[in-house]
Image (cartoon, rainbow, N blue to C red):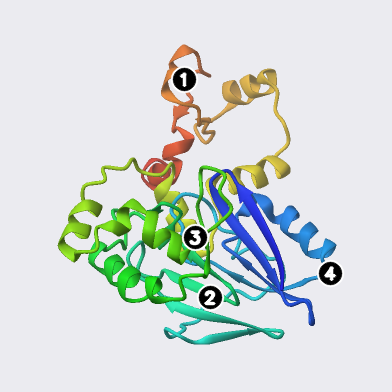
Amino acid sequence: MIFEHIATGGCQSYLVGCADTRAAVLIDPEITQLDRYLGLAAHNGLHIRYLIDTHTHADHFSATADESGAPIVDMRVDDGEMMALGRLRLQVLHTPGHTRDSVCLVVEDRVFTGDTLLIGATGRTDLPGGDPEALHESLFQRLLRLDSGLKVFPAHEYKGRSHSSIGQEMAENPRLQRRDRAAFVDMMRNLNLSMPTHITEALRVNMSGGKSVGQLLAEAAARVPFMSLTELRSHIEGATGELLVLDVREREAFERGHIPGARLLPRGQLELRVNEELPDPT
């Protein structure tokens, strides 16, 4: 098996390939790392056949909908089904709890646990689709019953650790010491974690396969010519009411100074407010 581990901040992606056929799968790819993934695949002589998200991500933008030529695994799979990757076999385990669509993937001596099981923690259950009762079932009745020697590779890791094992997590993971269902559920419901940045936008993009506001702005910047302040002033003075100047900075920066007549719509709120603030003229 050919294996590459790619970290993007706390987000972890994995390139897994068959050494005989050179077919590969990319697990939990992050949109900003596409060139890196393709470079690693080329370096190892791999052909990426599948892009798989272990769950719908709420804290970053997935690359699974990117037009890279690899098929997207968006089909329904049953718990325990096998996916063929050359001579490798990926076993799919449905492990809801962090999200309804969470899965883990067992490949040879390792299991890719997504956000179901982290190193020293578990996925949270307070985001859309989260369910602490389901997570308890997935962990204690499914995942933790696998071979204790299986290496654990999660979708997030913030302390620089590459992997753990099922046995190590059972012995040392603080959340897994709450094995009683009621105690576990109570703990998960009282974690009081902060919400991910741009959660609404990330969920919309990752669930629909659409583009993020950042991608849309980058594409617009590539097509729309640069306009100097002098040119803009000329356009504003000659406008007949059809010109809209949108300022996407934060309010504090806007209040320090802005173009007369500009409308404030901070970039972080753009996805939530755009339909209300800018109704379709058609």
First along the sequence among labels 2 and 3: 2
Secondary element type, mark 2: strand
* Quadrant that contains the N terminus: bottom right
In percent of width and height, residue 161 lies at: 56, 48
Is 127 placed left or right of 198 in the picture?
left
Say the numbered circle drawn on residue 254: 1
Image coordinates for residue 227, horizontal then vertical, percent: 70, 28
Going by the numbered disc 4, the residue's amino acid type is: Gly
Tell me which numbered mark, 4 or 2, is placed earlier along the sequence.
Answer: 4
Gap between marks 3 and 1 measured at Cα: 31 Å
Q: Which residue is disc 3 drawn over?
A: 206
Please say whether residue 210 is visible from this viewpoint: yes
For marks 4 and 2, give the one nearer the viewer: 2
* Residue beneath disc 2: 106
Left or right, residue 175 beside residue 37: left
The 10 Å Cα crowd at callout 1, few under 14, some 14 to 19, many 20 or more, is: some
Q: Which residue is mark 4?
A: 45
Q: Are marks 4 and 3 in contact (CB under 8 Å)?
A: no
Residue at screen point 46% across, 54% down:
119
Camera-side residue of 229 and 182: 182
Which of the 4 image quadrants contains residue 135?
A: bottom left
Front position in the image: 86 or 229: 86
Going by the numbered disc 3, the residue's amino acid type is Asn
Q: Tell me which numbered mark, 3 or 1, is placed earlier along the sequence.
A: 3
